[in-house]
């Protein structure tokens, strides 16, 4: 095993030559399809750079085969969605804050799931304004969150195939994605709506909310039966829940290993790839589990052997996912180590109870969703993560135009500072705005210098 390093895509191009041919040939998605050579995905980042992901030229990557596998799996997602359609599988699009609907979908045979919302980082990865400009033409400009890129993708009809079914949230959900959903329907996408009730975090009405969500899941199941021409199976659902729970526990274990290791055992962008896999498992639940297992095993090996990246000693809690992954690389270059996160997807973390009614189990699991309740609920999630990770500082990477950011950033900052934890807050800048981007980097420089000085003073006492 090589020493843990972060390398660029050119170095990975040459390191890839040491990967055994057998591993390349046998690392495939959709393993239920025999002799599908096109499903190989263990390739270096330079392969995906050729297809337009230009930001890969600037990023740094972990040098383990486990990391390479996860990157290949993530970057091949939309190719995989097209391949699914060509192979006769059904394609489901799930939009909004839906943590358990993919679990329900995966319990049907020969289906795949994707989240159009996650196209929000495509303009950054491709260093292109095309999707944002298309969204602006349709009425969603810079006063809307970066998820507007998914509206551009719906309009362009080139980023994913037309879904067989599109399920989208209304109610207590992201306002910006709700605007994208309504515009996508105006363009002709037929939406099936899933309503999320508001959760009053100051008075108990858990049973009422659970009953409401239970009915939503039953309704969704009937719609899926009609779309997929099959009956919901409790047995198949139980098997799927076991897999989903295993994947969620793997992600939880990975986060624990990250925080408790003496040295940083894995890069922040790789960690974000793992954490976001719980949304849709990148279209292949079984293969996603294998990727997470590899990543967990590599991180355990590094933790147990005391190896990891050198010079990353400042423990950082990152709040709100940055659409621009280069920001995480930059904080690591400055000596930071992302030991914890709060990414607004808490509904993907609970273990689903496999011993009760299936729809009740899904409803119960979704009650922990981040955006269904108060800002104070999210503040408490951040404080729990702070306690678990013992971070030296926190970064909040807000999104200009995103409705929840101005309401939640200040309460989170106040709570962290009350605990004596320094906080840096900024809005992520859209691609191409170089002067504004340089200001963000300057603020990150100053913040990390202050944390380094603070740590030196603490050691001197």
Image (cartoon, grey):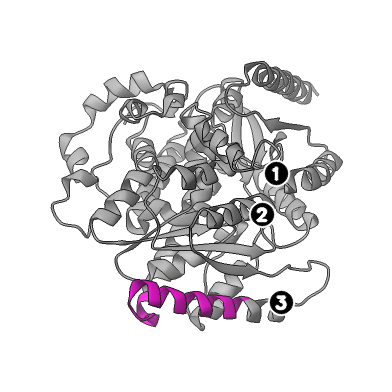
Mark 2: few/some/many CA within 10 Å (<14, 14-19, 20+): some
Question: Could you give the CA–CA distance between mark 2 and mark 3, rounded to whole angstroms?
Answer: 21 Å
Looking at the rendering, in which quadrant would you find the C terminus?
top right
The residue tagged with tag 3: helix, strand or loop? helix
**Residue with the mark numbered 2:** 174
Left or right position of 437 against 111: right
Residue topped by disc 3 = 206
Which of labels 3 and 1 is toward the front?
A: 1
Q: Is residue 294 left or right of residue 151?
A: left
Between marks 3 and 1, how big is the CA–CA gap? 28 Å
The residue that mark 1 highlights is: 402
Task: Give the residue drawn at x 76%, y 58%.
Answer: 377
The residue sitting at the bottom extreme is 357
Q: Is residue 127 above or below residue 361?
A: above
Q: Residues within 10 Å of mark 1 (few under 14, many from 20)?
A: many
Q: The residue tagged with tag 2: helix, strand or loop?
A: loop
Q: Which residues are magenta?
A: 213-237
Residue 33 in sight in this render: yes
In what element is the residue under mark 1?
A: loop
Closest to the observer, 25 or 163: 163
User: Where's residue 156, x and y in %?
Assistant: 44, 42
Q: Nearer the viewer, residue 293 or 366?
A: 366
Residue 63's spot in the image, x, y percent? 38, 29
Q: Which of marks 1 and 2 precedes in the sequence?
A: 2
**Residue at the location (78% across, 66% down)?**
201
Q: Do the residues under discs 2 and 1 have CB atoms within 8 angstroms?
A: yes
In the picture, measured across the screen, residue 357 lies left or right of residue 97, that is: left
């Amino acid at each position: 095993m090589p020493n843990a390093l972060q390398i660029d895509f050119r170095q990975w191009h040459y390191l890839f030559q040491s990967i055994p041919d057998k591993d390349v040939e046998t690392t495939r998605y959709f393993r239920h399809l025999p002799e599908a050579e096109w499903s190989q995905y263990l390739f270096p980042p330079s392969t995906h750079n050729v297809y337009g992901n230009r930001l890969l030229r600037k990023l740094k990557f972990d040098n383990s085969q486990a990391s390479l596998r996860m990157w290949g799996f993530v970057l091949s997602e939309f190719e995989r969605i097209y391949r699914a359609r060509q192979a006769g599988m059904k394609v489901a699009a799930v939009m909004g804050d839906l943590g358990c609907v993919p679990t329900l979908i995966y319990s049907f045979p020969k289906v795949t799931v994707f989240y159009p919302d996650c196209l929000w980082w495509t303009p950054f990865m491709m260093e292109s304004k095309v999707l944002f400009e298309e969204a602006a033409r349709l009425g969603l400009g810079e006063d809307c969150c970066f998820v507007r890129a998914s509206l551009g993708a719906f309009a362009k009809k080139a980023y994913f195939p037309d879904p067989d079914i599109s399920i989208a949230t209304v109610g207590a959900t992201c306002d910006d994605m709700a605007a994208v959903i309504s515009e996508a329907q105006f363009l002709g996408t037929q939406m099936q709506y899933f309503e999320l009730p508001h959760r009053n975090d100051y008075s108990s009405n858990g049973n009422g909310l659970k009953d409401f969500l239970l009915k939503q899941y039953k309704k969704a199941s009937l719609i899926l039966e009609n779309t997929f021409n099959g009956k919901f199976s409790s047995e198949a659902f139980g098997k799927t829940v076991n897999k989903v729970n295993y994947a969620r526990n793997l992600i939880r274990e990975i986060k624990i290993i990250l925080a408790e290791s003496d040295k940083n055992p894995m890069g922040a962008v790789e960690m974000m790839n793992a954490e976001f896999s719980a949304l849709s498992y990148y279209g292949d639940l079984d293969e996603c589990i294998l990727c997470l297992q590899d990543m967990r095993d590599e991180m355990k090996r590094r933790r147990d052997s005391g190896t990891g990246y050198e010079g990353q000693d400042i423990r950082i809690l990152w709040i709100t996912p940055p659409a621009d992954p280069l920001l995480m690389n930059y904080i690591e270059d400055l000596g930071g180590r992302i030991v914890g996160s709060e990414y607004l997807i808490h509904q993907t973390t609970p273990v689903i109870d496999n011993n009760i009614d299936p729809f009740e189990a899904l409803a119960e699991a979704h009650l922990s969703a981040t955006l269904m309740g108060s800002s104070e609920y999210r503040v408490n999630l951040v404080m729990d993560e702070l306690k678990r990770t013992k971070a030296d500082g926190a970064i909040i990477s807000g999104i200009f135009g995103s409705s929840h950011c101005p309401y939640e950033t200040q309460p989170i900052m106040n709570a962290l500072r009350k605990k004596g934890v320094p906080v840096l807050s900024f809005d992520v800048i859209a691609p191409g705005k170089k002067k504004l981007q340089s200001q963000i980097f300057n603020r990150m420089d100053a913040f990390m210098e202050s944390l380094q000085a603070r740590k030196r003073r603490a050691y001197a006492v």
